[in-house]
Image: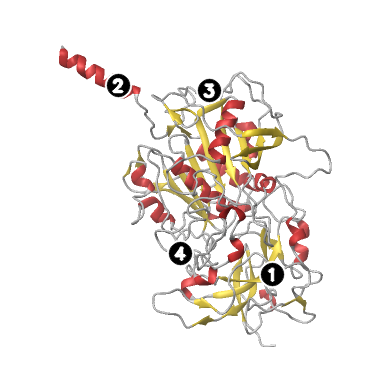
Amino acid sequence: MAQLATLCLAASLSFAVAQPAGSVLYDVETHKPSGSTGCGKASPYKQGKTSVATATYGGVKRTFRIYVPQKYNKNTPMPIIFQHPGWGMAAVYEEQGAGITLYAESLGFISVTPQGMDDNNNRGGPWFSWNAVGTSQSPGPGGPTCTEAGNYPSYCYNSCQKCTDKPQCDWTTCDEDVTPTGTGRINVGGFIPGLYDTLEEQLCIDTTREFAAGESNGGMMTYQLGVDLASRLAAIAPQFGSFHRGFNMVPLVGVPVLDIHGRSDTTVPANVSLSGDGYYYTPTHEIFNGNKYSKGWKEANGCSGAPKPYPTDYTGIKDLWCVDEGGDCTGGAVVRCDYIGGHNWFNGGGKDNGGLVVHFLMKWVKPSHIGRGYSIGENLGPGQLLENVTVLDLKLGEEDPSSSASLVQWSTGVLEPAWYQGHYGNPTQGCLSDEDAIPVGTGRTCAPRVGTKPKAPATPPAPKCKLGGVVANPQNGCPSDANVVNSQAWPICLAKGDNVTDPYSAGSFHCMLVCPCNVGAASSGECGIHSHDHCPAGARCERGELRKRDQGVCTYAFPSSATSIVV
């Protein structure tokens, strides 16, 4: 009997300690929601429309957008999804492009689009960004996070003090978004955990169904949140994001993950490390299966068995194909999807991208989470509430802090109008002798070739151009003549080729035209109609090739191959 009593005592003690656990599939028949501390309180946000709010964390003012459904009831716990914008992307355009909010009413969840930090005074803004996965910590365990050609001192943010490393690879804010350094698991806090805590306090949220998603730099932030908020988040959906080389980590408890990548993405590539603008990332295979820096997401989620197809309602659209890489996972599925496309939302954004993301996330529950990051067996602590939360009552003509007029920082006169046949023309009409017809966005363009310098052993090729950038550089080695009028487009040099999986390593460097993407944008992920005016006649401005998500490239929507001609 004494031994039995000891066993019973041990069992009760084991239940009393914290028990964070992996996620499980949602079952509408058996699910018991866990209401947050905000249940019973009147919502400070209008229902059935997006509100814009500001708050401070650590004395720094932040902005977020929030959609509370019309059907929201202050006594009924509701799921919540965060969608994090990419680099330079204003939250208002992210909400339109990502398509998450489109499903908030029908599926019954609160949609939040937080705004990244913009604390960079250099030309080329807005600089909205997230401090995560080593974006502000170069060099890291794998060395510098960019090549010598990717070096940009202007990418150093005010909050980072002086960036003195060579090459200068840091490219986001250093303000605290989830940890003080944006990586690791020490001192987890910051704006995003504080925003989750604050919304739990203001609204009736089902604490077992909190989710994170995001694209590009926001997709990187999503991966970092999956690591640092593993005991809290029921699932994550990073869209064309990754960890910088050497910074990949895994959650300590299972977190289901849906990785979404375009097959021709060379900006944050899925299958190789080196990007078209000279930055090193972690291929998705290594995020899932591990490398010398991490054991891999599959092991963290308790996966076993062979990969198997993962069916979705969108399979076949843009040749979308998803695979459950983990087979059978005790802590939640590990899924990757790819599709015909580049560094852009699935099918150009909007309802298909939103549906793919939301339908995966809403399948999962984190039963052990009781709120504010605490798990069953822990006392519910005070959390980290944001201060000075203010819901803005914007009048007609007042500036929305979740938007930006990036066009005002652009300048005319960079390109020289070519009245006969300049560079960057339509491949169906023939490219110049120093150009190749390469895929750009959803089309093709005539792209001037750029040679390479002799390289040292075991180093990547060095292009005879200034690689990348976010503003016009007349000395970057790209031709400046194009068939344009009053254009604010400018040429950029990137590693990009035709049917080249790893164009940087292959030394395939070309120039293309950058155009302002958000000008006159409609309520979708496409560039606005006036964006196309900055491209040569017949070309469109499209997202999909650049790290800066408020910028596009000029492309011609013709599938035909081009032949080179001499003029």
Q: How is the image coloured?
A: secondary structure
Is there CB contact under 8 Å for labels 4 and 2?
no
Mark pair 3, 4: CA separation: 45 Å
Foreground disc of the pair 3, 1: 1
Mark pair 4, 2: CA separation: 47 Å
Q: Quadrant of the C terminus?
A: bottom right
| Place of residue 335 in the rendered image (x, y in percent of width and height, measured from the top left) | 44, 46
228 lies above or below 462 = above
Is there CB contact under 8 Å for labels 3 and 2?
no
Disc 2 is placed on an element classified as helix
Mark with earlier residue (3, 2): 2
Residue beneath label 3, please? 35
Residue beneath label 2, please? 13
194 lies above or below 147 = above
Q: Residues within 10 Å of mark 1 (few under 14, many from 20)?
A: many
Q: Can residue 359 be seen by looking at this rendering?
A: no
Horizontal relation, residue 357 to residue 293: left or right? right
Disc 4 is placed on an element classified as loop
Is there CB contact under 8 Å for labels 3 and 1?
no
| Place of residue 541 in the rendered image (x, y in percent of width and height, measured from the top left) | 70, 62
- Give me the residue at 74% from left, 73% from top: 414
Disc 3 is placed on an element classified as loop
On residue 472, the disc is 1
Residue beneath label 4, please? 144
Mark with earlier residue (1, 2): 2
Amino acid found under the numbered disc labelled 3: Gly
Mark with earlier residue (3, 1): 3
Mark pair 3, 2: CA separation: 25 Å
